[in-house]
Image (cartoon, rainbow, N blue to C red):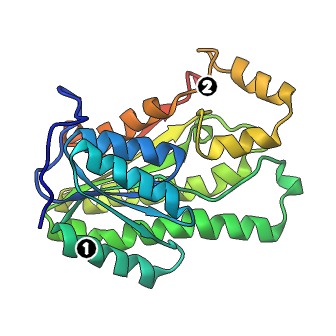
């Protein structure tokens, strides 16, 4: 039985619109950016199904926040590198919510910044498997469900470094190049089914994976990164989430195969 919904926590006039039936799936919804994406989706009137890899407590907190706003929530652990687990997860979601209308992949490999010459073959392979192969599994296996529901949207988190490569960033740009190719392939091949795919190329953001990247950088490198941005600051999680939710929503219904870069002008 569906929980009673209310307008508590909603944002009247928010710029995103979604189908009244079905659910938005957020892969990595327990992360820094994923959490805000889940919040924004709920504020737009979406039920939210989120996944996590290890942090069950944070995922439960995000799910509770969605329910408090007035929407249904579902939280499940998921290993994207296991295709059978991904397919089983989507079946679970469709069984509970009826259809999937949006997929946001807000996760990636846990990487560090270093020169290509210092990256081991094993580290490279692990990054590709966890980031690119995991993304491929998430997208390929959701397509039949989006088709069955009459279409939908996919949004991937990518990197602003795809537009302007930064030294020591190959562990990010390498798999993200493949992810961008998958996004364009879906846009070209699945548009006839009403399925859109876009990406958001993030620069330095104040949460999520960047928290771990900052830990590996010297104070001098961190200051140089901030001063290299024309806006002279790093981005905020809610700024990233707003862009992601807009691309996932019906307000961007004629936008597909695109990368929206959020980097404060760094790649200009």
Q: In the figure, is residue 213 to the left or right of 250? A: right
Could you say whether the residue bearing mark 1 is in a helix, strand or loop? helix
Q: Quadrant of residue 18?
A: top left
Q: In the figure, is residue 18 to the left or right of 197? A: left
How far from the left and from the top, in percent, is residue 100? 23, 63
Could you say whether the residue bearing mark 2 is in a helix, strand or loop? loop
Q: Which residue is mark 2?
A: 234
Q: Where is the C terminus found, in terms of image quarters? A: top right
Q: Is there any visible trace of residue 257 in the rendered image?
A: no
Separation (CA) of disc 1 from disc 2: 38 Å
Against 253, residue 98 (above or below) is below
Q: Name the residue at 73% across, 26% down.
A: 225
Q: Quadrant of residue 6?
A: top left
Q: Quadrant of residue 42?
A: top left
How far from the left and from the top, in percent, is residue 173? 64, 49
Q: Name the residue at 21% across, 36% down.
A: 8
Q: Name the residue at 55% across, 22% down.
A: 264
Q: Which residue is mark 1?
A: 144
Q: Is there any visible trace of residue 90 in the rendered image?
A: yes
Mark 1 crowdedness (10 Å alpha carbons): few <14, some 14-19, many ≥20: few
């Amino acid at each position: 039985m569906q929980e009673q919904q209310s307008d508590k926590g909603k944002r009247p006039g928010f710029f995103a619109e979604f189908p009244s039936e079905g659910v938005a799936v957020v892969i990595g919804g327990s992360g820094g950016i994923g959490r805000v994406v889940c919040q924004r989706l709920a504020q737009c009137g979406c039920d939210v199904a989120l996944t996590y890899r290890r942090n069950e407590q944070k995922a439960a907190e995000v799910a509770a926040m969605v329910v408090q706003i007035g929407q249904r929530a579902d939280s499940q652990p998921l290993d994207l590198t296991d295709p059978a687990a991904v397919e089983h997860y989507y079946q679970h979601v469709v069984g509970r919510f009826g259809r999937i209308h949006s997929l946001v992949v807000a996760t990636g490999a846990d990487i560090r910044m270093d020169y290509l010459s210092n990256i081991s073959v094993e580290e490279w392979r692990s990054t590709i498997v966890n980031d690119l192969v995991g993304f491929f599994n998430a997208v390929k296996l959701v397509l039949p469900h989006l088709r069955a529901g009459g279409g939908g949207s996919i949004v991937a988190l990518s990197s602003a470094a795809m537009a302007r490569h930064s030294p020591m960033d190959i562990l990010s740009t390498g798999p993200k190049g493949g992810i961008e190719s998958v996004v364009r392939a879906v846009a070209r091949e699945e548009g006839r089914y009403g399925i859109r795919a876009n990406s958001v190329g993030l620069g330095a953001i104040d949460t999520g994976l960047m928290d771990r990247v900052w830990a590996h950088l010297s104070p001098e490198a961190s200051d140089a990164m901030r001063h290299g941005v024309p806006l002279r600051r790093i981005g905020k999680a809610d700024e990233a989430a707003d862009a992601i939710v807009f691309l996932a929503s019906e307000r961007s219904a004629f936008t597909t195969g695109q990368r929206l870069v959020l980097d404060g002008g760094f790649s200009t």
